[in-house]
Amino acid sequence: MEPIRPGLEGVVVAETALSDVDGTNGRLTIAGYPVEELAPNASFEQTAFLLWKGRLPDEAEARNLQARLAARRHLAPLTLELIAHAARADRPVIDSVRMAIATLPTTEDDFEDALTVTATIPTAIAAHHRIAQGDDPISPREDLGHVANYLAMLQGRLPSEEETRALETYLNTVVDHGLNASTFAARVIASTGSDLVSCLVGAVGALKGPLHGGAPGPALDMVREIADVERAEAHMKALLSRGERLMGFGHRVYRTRDPRADVLAAAAERLYASGVDRSLYDLATGVEASALRLLEAHKPGRNLRTNVEFYTALLLDGLGLPTSLFTPTFAMARAIGWAAHVVEQRRNNRVIRPQSRYVGERGLSIVPKAVGTLPS
Ligand code: ACO
């Protein structure tokens, strides 16, 4: 009998040229570029073009992509109405992202659909956030880049270059990451021949789960709870002795440092150096040093290191984003990867259809209901 592989762990089901997660050596390659090279240097539009077209754009192509995204930023009245309902009912913002994508028209052209979904997500997030706070949504601006426009719609002011660069670095860092659950979900749907919009609705559903996209909040909660670096060691020792995990450390695939943590740490350092209040950042770096010492003593040789969630939390918090926006902002980036995987899946498609082993009962019988006994 074939062994069952729960979670498909270790099972290779696709070839991809989009990203390579080398967990043993702590390396992440995105379409040929080490993440350390791509994330801090490319614009979001350049990264999207890279994943969708397989190479970086020239200047005219990048401008063209930016303009095509900008032209699709406005929400249809029905979409906005749905978002307003969700925001007033205090639903999670990611629900509005899912619903907004689901309202989009579909075409035969994956690239067109990818542009529309990508352009819609930030407007949906910002609209939900502002309505939930009792403010009016801010209309998207067509003269700004994708990331600057997102921050402007959220905060009602033009972001500084450092802020835009910091968020762009984050989005580029998490744009794609092998066959993670949401990407796999998108590919499963694509394998049936469904349209790209449907694939991305399914992917958002997978990302919403706390075991996938919902973790950066707790890392920040732990740092805030510690509050004073002097208390860090005692606080975390107590957590470990109760069998709890330190949030923002360890990873299923990376058996060494998570390379994304380093990229985000450098981006956070640059952001905080630009004048943002750094008290939380300084506290967090103190907590991190203490956590790494404790984890080495707790699991010697296991190399439990800082993961992407720790610095994601610090970076997004430094940009003034509340934790309610962390997962939706992650979706904004990963949508690029999802769309690229849909296109890749179509190129060499076979319906993804694994098997299950039946462990239920057999041979049960059912007594048919007598015919003609309807109540008179
Ligand atoms: N704190 C304390 N102990 C830990 C931690 C941690 N953060 N991470 C792993 N360990 C322990 C495990 O309990 C396990 O102990 P055991 O052998 O006594 O059971 C041992 O170290 C080895 O664990 P792994 O096999 O490396 O971890 P696993 O693959 O099961 O889990 C995970 C990985 C879920 C990320 C884990 O490290 C964790 O819970 N971290 C904290 C939560 C977190 O930061 N999540 C976000 C991850 S990033 C992302 O998913 C995109």
Image: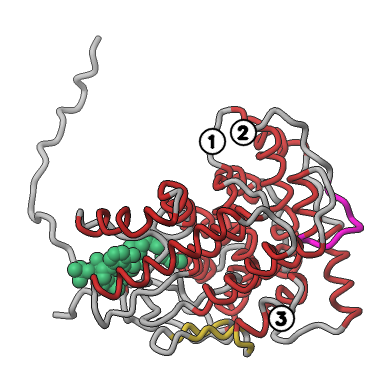
Query: The disc labelled 2 sits on which kind of residue?
Result: Ala
| Labels 2 and 1 touching (C-beta < 8 A) | yes
The span from disc 3 to disc 1 (Cα, nearest Å) is 34 Å
Question: Which sits in the foreground, 182 or 46?
Answer: 46
User: Which element carries disc 2, helix, strand or loop?
Assistant: helix
Is residue 7 among what the camera can see?
no
Query: Is the residue marked by circle 1 packed among few (<14), some (14-19), or many (20+) residues within 10 Å?
Result: some
Q: Which residue is mark 2?
A: 87
Query: The disc labelled 1 sits on which kind of residue?
Result: Arg
The image quadrant where one finds ligand 1 is bottom left
Magenta stretch, main secondary structure, is loop
143 left or right of 244 in image: right
| Labels 3 and 2 touching (C-beta < 8 A) | no
Question: Which sits in the foreground, 326 or 51?
Answer: 326
Q: Which residue is mark 3?
A: 50
* Mark toward the start of the polypeptide (3 vs 1): 3
The residue sitting at 86% across, 78% down in the picture is 61
> What's drawn in magenta, residue-wise?
140-147
Instruction: Give the answer, above or below, for where 292 lies relative to 327.
Output: below
Q: Which residue is mark 1?
A: 91
The residue sitting at 65% across, 46% down in the picture is 100
Q: How is colour applied across the structure in the image?
A: secondary structure
Q: Position of residue 287 (x, y in %)?
A: 43, 61
Q: Is residue 141 magenta?
A: yes
The residue at label 1 has a CB less than 8 Å from ligand 1: no
The residue at label 2 has a CB less than 8 Å from ligand 1: no
**How many numbered discs sit on the rendered protein?**
3
User: Which element carries disc 3, helix, strand or loop?
Assistant: helix
Q: Quadrant of the C terminus?
A: top left
